[in-house]
Image (tube, grey):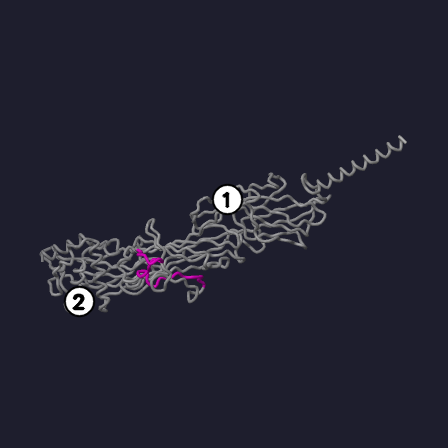
Amino acid sequence: MNKVLKGLVAVAATAAMAVAGFAGASTAMAAEGDVTITIGSETTPASVGDVYAGYRLFDETEATVGEKTNVAYQKRAGWAHYDKVADAIKVVDSSSTVTKDSKVDDFVDAIGKFNTDQIKKFAESLYKSLKTANVDADAISAAVADDATSTTLTGPQGYYLIVQTVAANDKGKTMSAVIVNTAGQSGVTVSPKKDTVTVSKKVQENQDGVNNPDAENWGTAADYNIGDYVPFQLTGTLPADYADYSSYAYTFHDTASAGLTFVNDAAHTVKVYAVNGSNKVELKADATNGYQVLTKGISTGETFNVKFADLKKAQAANDDTVNIDKDTKIVVEYYAQLNANAVLGANGNPNEVYLEFSNNKYGEGTGKTENHKVTVFTFKLEVTKYGKTDSGKEALNGAGFTLYKATKANPTDSDYTKVGGEVKNLDGNVFDFTGLDSGYYKIVETTTPKGYNTIDPITFTVIATYNSADEPGTLTDLTVTDVKVGGVASAEQTFTVNRGTGEAGTAQIKTDVVDIPGSKLPSTGGMGTVLLYVAGIAVFVLAGATLVMALRRRNA
């Protein structure tokens, strides 16, 4: 008996009640009768929906000598699975001589030598074996209720293997197992500590030269012109016990709003990588030995999936060796095009993802992470055309404007490219340019109403500011600066800005332009100047000829 107690003390000292995915255990006073094992607490809650099962490996025995009660364990009568316990011990310690027929103190001595990691390995190996053999558990907990933080198992005092049989699938957690020593206790509380799988989503800000000098400027918010191709990046992690899985399902579920169109063509191809530190290996697009990009046969409302039927079988795109372990990140890079359905202003165009993954290394089952979201913004410019009159100004139709955007900071005239075609309004004086992002712009009047001067080009800079620490990112400010007419700052040209939420017909940036009646004289060096010079010379020649003729008549 002393040898048994010595072994139990060793077990309690090394494994206690905190192994194989559980953080720790607290105990109550010794008591006779059944023991209640509580999984979860207010400080370390179990997830809603979790279910646990208990396998009693040994029975508790008690002996009272005077006022002192000694506690030990004995084999369960009629329990026919000690061969599996012995095999699980040998998985950890191949030199072990324990067999199914060994005495209880031999089992306790062997387990008592294990450290925390070895206890975890023992527990997981034993559960796999019991599950494969369809051995029924001795106690099953109820699922953790919506308003609860724990669940309980009740059974005779003993030495228990506690396993999680159902994992809540909305927390990014994997399933776990633990050894619990209940000797002489009326209750034990176990705190779940599960391996976690996470996913993140980023969008890359385009390089318009305004306020994003970093070519790797990834965040939770960005702005683009309608028609632009927007780069996105998904990053998933793996659990600490990834190596313990024989196969591993892994799927990214992506959902875009109506303003974003998923693209997977030759110029904008979905790419998937296994990333270990600075080492980035592209993975093969293959249903068996890699991943599939799915747009059909997926959940309603989703845009596309990137699915690994078994991540364990993934190969490099060039057939080189690829190493995927618990520290590997799986990275998806893809594009979506900002389309004409894009929401304008502060509400933006969200795009979100969640990750579905294997969470039961003892059998089938998947969990999922929480959804993670980014937002793409775009804006509307409204130009109102007036004609100058004696009484002030009045609406002037018949004009046409073309918008240009610069390709770099501090642009010259040659650095601007056309954004769409001319916006012309024959009946009305309001001109809309929909789908602007941050950048340097120029408005050019390309059609001028008859009888009016053409305005000089108006140049300006749009700057959108975001809080990328938010998820999704939020628009914090929208400004128009460096307003210039013909390259010269003008107090007459003003812009009004309203970040707005994108209601129909709402513009975030507005400005008025005024045409002056009449025609400008041609500038120096133009054809008109040549004609004027020619006309002037003709006048002088005519005057000279007249003078000569007059002098001849006088002399005659």
Other residues around mark 1 within 10 Å, as few (<14) / some (14–19) / many (≥20): some
Gap in Å between the C-alphas at discs 2 and 1? 70 Å
What's the residue type where badge 2 is placed? His
Q: Nearer the viewer, mark 2 or mark 1?
A: 1
Residue beneath the point at 15% across and 62% down: 86
Mark number for residue 81?
A: 2
Q: How far from the left and from the top, in percent, is residue 125? A: 22, 61
Q: Quadrant of the C terminus?
A: top right
Other residues around mark 2 within 10 Å, as few (<14) / some (14–19) / many (≥20): some
Q: Quadrant of the N terminus?
A: bottom left
Q: How far from the left and from the top, in percent, is residue 249? A: 33, 62
Q: Which residues are magenta?
A: 301-322
What's the residue type where badge 1 is placed? Val
Residue beneath the point at 27% across and 55% down: 191
Q: How far from the left and from the top, in percent, is residue 374? A: 44, 53
* Left or right: 465 as drawn, with respect to 67: right
Tell me which numbered mark, 2 or 1, is placed earlier along the sequence: 2
* Left or right: 422 as drawn, with respect to 33: right
Quarter holding residue 302? bottom left
Q: How far from the left and from the top, in percent, is residue 123? A: 21, 60
Reading the image, the residue beneath label 1 is: 210
Q: Main secondary structure of the magenta part?
A: loop
Mark number for residue 61?
A: none
